[in-house]
Image: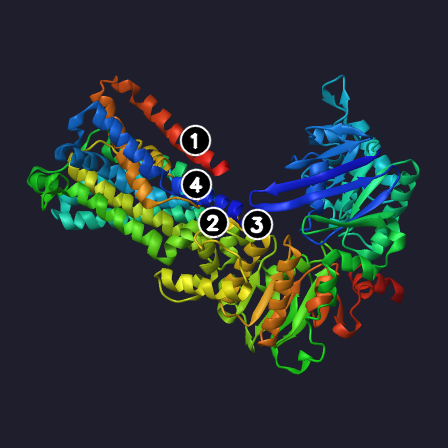
Amino acid sequence: MNKLELSKESMSLRWRNITTNYSHWLSFILLMIVAVCVNPSFLSWNNLTNQFVQGAIIGICAMGMSLVITAGMIDLSTGSTVAIISGLSVYVLNATKSILLTMLFCLAMGLALGAVNGLLVTKGNIAPFIVTLATMSAYRSIINQLGQGGPFTVSSEMYESFRMVAAGKTLGFPNLLLFFVMITVITSLLMNHVKFGRYVYAVGSNELSARLSGINVDRVKFLIFSYAGLLSGLSAFLLASRLTAIQAASAGDGYEMDAIAAVAIGGTSMSGGKGKIIGTFLGVLMLRIINTVLIMANVPPFLNGLVRGIIIIIAVLAQSKKKNK
Amino acid sequence: MFLEMKQISKEFGPVKALTDVSFSVGPGEIHGLLGENGAGKTTLMNVLSGTFPPTSGEIFIDGKKMEHMTPRKSTMLGIRFIHQELNLCNDLTVYENMYLGEEILRNGCLINKKEMARRAQEVLDGMNVKINAVSVVSQLDQAQKQLVEIAKALLFRSELIIMDEPTTALNNHEIENLFEIMRALKQQGVSFIYISHKMPELFAVCDKYTVLRDGMFIQSGHFAEIDEHGATELLIGKAFVDANLKDDSCSPADTEVVLSVRGLTGKTFHDVSFELHRGEVIAVTGLQGAGSAELAEALFGASASTGEIVLNGRRLKPVTIRNAMRSGIAMVPCNRKERGIFPDLSIQNNHSMAGFVIRKGMAVHEKVERQSFEGNRKKLEIKVDSPKDPITSLSGGNQQKVIVGRWLETDADVFIMDNPTQGIDVGAKYQIYKLIVELARQGKSILVFSTEFPEIWHIADRCIVMYKGRVNGDIPRSSLTEVSMMAYSTGSNLEVRR
């Protein structure tokens, strides 16, 4: 009898594990059903790919944010990083006339700015919140000064070819969708099949245990910020291509908040140690779908933020409930 | 006060901390509560003081049933709890700490500092200790902090004082002082529950005893009716006392030196030198604050030190964790919950962490990970449902075995084990002792940091005793007794010489 009770207990434990581990799928499917009910044409190919295209640029940032948060940290500088790089990338493009060089510039610059965050957090021993709050303000200020209120505009001779990076299609799929999916796959591989990924979870779960297991915690943190910066650089490149005219003050504005929201909705614990890349992927899509549904349902656009706020709270509450049980 | 606890059970998730424990204390009685680490003593006391409710069971005080006990309520009833861990705020003064949460007020709102300092000083003077009530706690040493913790309980009129290992940092003189105070209060009808691992103390001051083992009530009675050997048998089980883990004939002192430490100095220890031979088990012990805990960390490179650490003839330089691991040192840290486990990760992932750091290559091979865990699961008899369950679903003993397995994977020559049996049941303890002896037989060298004599006696070839940051004694197994160990760790051997 005792054994029976025990197996019952472990059954319920396992069931709880399943619901915890796949809650992001559950909420994603629920949301899809709601969307289809509001407007059956939601499932059209055009609309579905459009969700990806709309979400891709923030989605790529969210992948970096996912690592940062899983390690128990935060990055507020994402939006400003995207803004400064995309603004400068237009300069580079106009000067070099090379899309490839522009992309390399964006990636290198992203890596460098991420590394600055990482260095300040590790060598400077300053809390990530404070470091990235400071760099957020600094980067935005630099690009505002360089722009002097006007936009950074791609010169007319590069306009068409550069625009097609983001607007174009490959094998019938929008390029933005492909970029987003590719980065998701790479990040997922990194987190699940490379030692580094395991260290990220370890640092987020218990930093002291990680240190005493021989993990170089500082190096892990530095690499996380560098990776997040790299992805912000890619994101900035795609944004510049999509808009072809970058407004210093508004480019990338609020990206960090959207990225954090996507990570949270995707089931990553804000205190670190727990979370899945696929969750963040679905989180990004869910944010887009919510937007689309609200538009389709004729909710006044000013109330968009309210609904999103409520959904974020519900999503995170649901997770913490499960944890406490 | 007449206290009765009836059939108390307490479960933390899947872990049963207490099962049907009954316990009673009469007025003016000093009651010794005995049990190894993890036997459930602290849990029982936390139930009594209302820190958390029992899963089932009843508490009666003076015949009246107590419902929904809270810390506040138990304080009102005159129950005072001197906790094992020091709960002092380092940046506040002694008297502010003593009155924390129960400040004396002037005109109903302002804190009356003068009055508080005066009364606190009165209590401290009454205890015959030289502590200034207005000094800041961070300036005190471990022993003084422990005394402040005790003074806190004496500040108010109480009926029942619970002391959870109050003497871990005190020397003989201070302990004797404490016993005087306890005896005087006992005359006034105050009851005590006294928790300690030190047999001589229990026999000196307590009237009655109750023994817990693995969360269960074992026996209760008068100290006058048993001797130390009998008490130890009750404590850890007869079979366990008789078990002879150590083959006394082997004397590893003539094998080659694996680890040699010369003049190691850190923040709280000075000029520590010793040699560890192949296949040798050395226990390092000392009172709280004697520097042994920091020494364990320093040997593994987890905290800074100067001096030489030479492993297999090669000097470790610089002394970092990674370097220590690569040259063949492993450390099972103390305080598993805070320093050992990754609560969000699965059992298998917890197990493989140190091996990952050591091994070359970037990829994670799930299959290798599973196989290495399976190997250690059998060797250490770890009870798991699925290696993918979270580690927090395991009992303390099994968690600790996973952590030990983590370090076996690094194939080290020297194992540092810092309190390896903290908070685990007797069965798991025994298995860990067996493993330590077995590792030594295979030619590994082991440094066990521990404060429990029965544990040290079971496994150690010799015992290094620290006192005030220095090595005060190096006792070979042949002359290892609890009395000799206590003499070295309280520094009383130095007093005699003077």
Q: Tell me if mark 3 has few (under 14), some (14-19) or many (20+) residues whose alpha carbon lies within 10 angstroms of its own.
A: some
Task: Name the image quarter holding residue B101.
Answer: top right
* Distance between the alpha carbons at the discs numbered 3 and 1: 26 Å
Q: Is residue A83 above or below residue B370?
A: above
Question: Residue, x 32% and y 49% (percent of image)?
Answer: A227
Q: Is residue B241 above or below residue A5?
A: below
**Which residue, given by chain and number where applicable, does mark 1 sit on?**
A317
Q: Are the residues under badges 2 and 3 in a single subunit?
A: yes
**Which residue, given by chain and number where applicable, does mark 2 sit on?**
B390
- Callout 4: chain: A
- Callout 3: chain: B
**Which residue, given by chain and number where applicable, does mark 3 sit on?**
B337
- Callout 2: chain: B
Q: Amino acid at mark 3?
A: Lys
Q: Is residue A38 left or right of residue B172?
A: left
Q: Is residue B361 above or below residue A5?
A: below
Measured as percent of width and height from the top left, residue B88 is found at 70, 40
Marks 3 and 4 in Cβ contact (< 8 Å): no
* Distance between the alpha carbons at the discs numbered 2 and 3: 14 Å
Nearer mark to the viewer, of 1 and 4? 4
Task: Name the image quarter holding residue B114.
Answer: top right
Residue B445 visible in the picture? yes
Comparing A181 with B348, the one in front is: B348
Q: Are the residues under badges 3 and 1 in a single subunit?
A: no
Question: Residue, x 27% and y 42% (percent of image)?
Answer: A60
Q: Is residue B204 left or right of residue B248?
A: right
Marks 4 and 2 in Cβ contact (< 8 Å): no
Marks 2 and 3 in Cβ contact (< 8 Å): no
Residue A141 visible in the picture? no
* Distance between the alpha carbons at the discs numbered 3 and 4: 23 Å
